[in-house]
Amino acid sequence: MVPNLGRQEPQTARKGARRLPRRESALLWWALFAAFAGAAWWFQSWRIALLGLLTWCLYEFLLVPTLCRVLKRQGHPCTTRVRGRLFACEPHHQRLKNDALWRLVGLRNPFHRDDGEAEDETGVVVYSAAVRGRLTPADRTLVILAALGTVATIVGMVYGFR
């Protein structure tokens, strides 16, 4: 890197570089969840609490701003931004993440396609596909909690119909 000797303006970004759009603050979502909890407490309604729980589960599965986190062939995690813990940034990473989600349930992915991923251009693979697609402990925990919350919501809705 060349030091700026004061003769020119410092370049803040590469020319033609694309800025990523800003995302909404997570505090907005948590304010919505707090509003559901407050309304459930105020009205003494477990149905509103279930609706808040279902909203949180939807947020964790589909809407939370997160990173792809699938390990690349070189061994470092992908840092591309995605929405939802169930999604990845590109089709190949999505296949790895789908396999990891099926393994989380204890099953093999019945829709798995073997696309010859054993080698890349260099012929070197640091981590296998099974290791690369592993969910991080935080993602695994939150996916399990959201799945349990969804099941609890469905059971609560069925119970509410009686």
Image (spheres, rainbow, N blue to C red):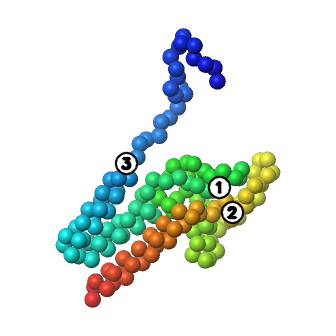
Q: Which residue is mark 2?
A: 131
Residue found 42% across the figure and 78% down from its top: 151
**Nearer to us in this view, 119 or 54:** 54
The CA span between labels 3 and 2 is: 32 Å
Q: Which residue is mark 3?
A: 24
Residue found 77% across the figure and 47% down from its top: 121
The CA span between labels 3 and 1 is: 27 Å
> In the current view of this chain or complex, which residue is farthest to the left?
43
So how many labels did they put on this image? 3
In x, y percent, where is residue 115? 70, 60
Whether label 1 touches label 2, CB < 8 Å: yes
| Quarter of the view holding residue 56 | bottom left
Q: Which residue is mark 1?
A: 71
Residue 91 visible in the current orientation: no
Going by the numbered disc 2, the residue's amino acid type is Val
Residue found 47% across the figure and 59% down from its top: 84
